[in-house]
Image: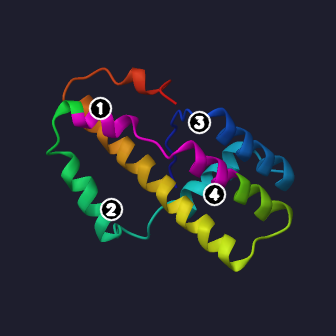
Amino acid sequence: MSAEAITLHLPGSLYDLFQRKAQQSHRSVEAVLLEAVAAAAPEGDDLPPDLARALSQLSSLNDRNLWLAARDRLSDTSLAELETLNLKQQREGLTEDETGRLAELARGYERVILLRAEAACLLKERGHDISVLVDSD
C-alpha cells in the first residue's frame, strides 16, 4: 500500500488533545491522527446527502463567499465541549446522552473541516493564494 505525505496545521488545543491521546496509548501522534482520519472517512464515496449537496454547491459560490466558507469554523463553545467530552471519554467514559452529543459535535466538526478544505481547493483552482488560511485559526 502506498502512502502520501501531507502537512496538517492543527489548532494548539486540538494538537494537545491528540498528543495526550498518543501518550496514553503509547503511540505516535501520527498514528493517532491516522486512526482518526480513517475512522472519519466514509466507506466508499457515500457522503450524507446534505453534505454532498453542500459540497457540490460550493463551486457555484463567488470568491467572496468561498473565502467565508474557507474560514468557517465550529464555535469556540462547541470546540470546548468537543474537547471536554473527548477527554471525559478517555478518562471515565460517557453516558449515552454524552456519547450522542459527542457524535453530533464530531459530525459538525468534520463537516466544517471538509467544507473548508473544498472551499480552499476551489480558491486555489481559481488562482488565489490560500496560504493565509494556514494561520487563520
Marks 2 and 4 sit apart, C-alpha to C-alpha, by 22 Å
Identify the amino acid type marked 1: Trp
From the top left corner, tell me how far across and down residue 122 is, in percent: 24, 37
Q: Quadrant of residue 54?
A: bottom left
Q: Mark 3 — residue?
A: 10
Q: Mark 1 — residue?
A: 67
Q: Mark 4 — residue?
A: 35
Q: Return the residue nearer the eye: 2 or 135.
A: 135
Identify the amino acid type marked 2: Leu
Q: Mark 2 — residue?
A: 51
Identify the amino acid type marked 3: Leu
Marks 2 and 3 sit apart, C-alpha to C-alpha, by 23 Å
SS at badge 3 = loop
SS at badge 4 = helix
Of the image marks 1 and 2, the number of the one nearer the N terminus: 2
Of the image marks 3 and 4, the number of the one nearer the N terminus: 3
Question: Could you tell me which residue is drawn at 32 percent across and 40 percent down?
Answer: 69
**Mark 3 and mark 2 in contact (Cβ < 8 Å)?**
no
Mark 1 or 3: the one toward you: 1
Span shown in magenta: 65-83
